[in-house]
Image (cartoon, rainbow, N blue to C red):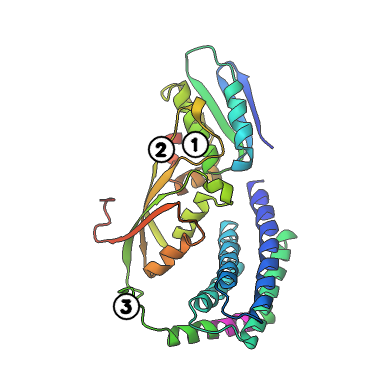
Amino acid sequence: MLHVYKNEPMSICISGDLIVSEACSLYTALAKLKLDTEGEVVVDLQKVVAMDASGMQILLAFRRHLGSERVNFHNLPAHILDTLKLGGMDGYFR
Amino acid sequence: MAQDFLRQGFVTEAEELLSGMEDGLLSLESSPEDAETLNGIFRAGHTIKGGAGLINVEEIVTFTHVLENVLDRLRKKEILADQPLVTLLLRGCDVIRRMVASVAKEQPVPVDDNYDRTLTALRNYADLAIAGAKPKETGEPVDEHRERVFRICFHPHENLFETGQDPLMLLLGLGDLGEMLAVESNVDRLPVFNELVAEKLYLSWRVLLRSQRPRSEVEDVFSFLSDDNDIAIAEVMNCDHFQ
């Protein structure tokens, strides 16, 4: 089960499985978010259960969309960090 | 929670794959050299091993690794799927099925007398196969177990997910063969967010792998993929960079 919601005006919490079977849901949820201000955006990944390459590329494209310098991924669980390292993607999420 | 998710996924997939393996083995009794069947059985065993590795069930990894060696020799026609071997492989499937059932119940995996005897018998076939293997015609060095560094460039087709493949599982499969000296992802194909199709794959990878395994085992990691995936494997002398 995937959940994406704005916790605060500039904080997004994502929980659940960021995998290909949920990829459309994740993409749609992120596309619908209204982030009006131009400050830092925190994406909290603490409750992410699983992530595959589809989840990685959606989050990365979302970050670029908002402006890479604005978006920070926070609270990456250790097992997700391991998965990112396996895919050589950890550098994009630090 | 993540481990639960992975474990359940492994159990479901392994049960399906085992049923397919058993059907394939039974069909070998009438057509022992059917390449498609042999490849299918090998792929199933390989996938079960990869899944077991992902959830750290070492007993299943060890067992399926030996089983996979035998299946690999079978598909290379180094040994024949005669009745005793088919019976042994079916027994192997039964051993794996019981281990998978234990994983499903979150119980310790049974490593009993049947496990040991079956594994020993399978090892005998693997060893026989190695002893009887024909010289390779690919220019492979005689010393297959020397350490070497492979550079693997993996540009998957954008529809890879549709085939049920996960590129990270393939990278995990490479990791099983040795030490991943470097993994470099390439995101150049990633479109802007508004043009992204969520279920397409835009990433590609370059990997430096140090391994004592022969090149053929590196190639086997990608053997399930269709030809529209671009894979280049090269042995390199300099392991400091990708060039």
Question: Quick one: SS at disc 3?
Answer: loop
Query: Label 2 is placed on what type of residue?
Result: Val
Classify mark 3: residues with Cα within 10 Å, few (<14), some (14-19) or many (20+): few
Eyeballing the image, is B230 above or below B62?
A: above
Query: Label 3 is placed on what type of residue?
Result: Asp
Question: Which residue: 32% across, 62% down?
Answer: B149
Most common secondary structure along the magenta stretch: helix
Query: Label 1 is placed on what type of residue?
Result: Gln
- Pointers 1 and 3 in contact (C-beta within 8 Å): no
Residue under pointer 3: B143
Question: Which residue: 70% across, 74% down?
Answer: B94
Out of B228 and B104, give the one closest to the viewer: B228
Q: Is B48 part of what is drawn in magenta?
A: no
Segment colored magenta: B116-124
Eyeballing the image, is B36 above or below A45?
A: below
Residue most toward the right?
Answer: B105
Residue under pointer 1: A57
Residue under pointer 2: B187
Say left or right for A1 vs B35: right
- Pointers 2 and 1 in contact (C-beta within 8 Å): yes
| Residue A57, horizontal then vertical, whole percent | 49, 36
User: Between tags 3 and 2, which lies in front?
Assistant: 2
Q: Is B117 part of what is drawn in magenta?
A: yes
Q: Are marks 3 and 2 on the same chain?
A: yes
Question: Which residue: 69% across, 61% down?
Answer: B16
Say left or right for B213 vs B92: left
Q: Chain of mark 2?
A: B
Answer whether residue A1 is visible to the viewer in this image: yes
Q: CA distance from mark 2 to mark 1?
A: 8 Å
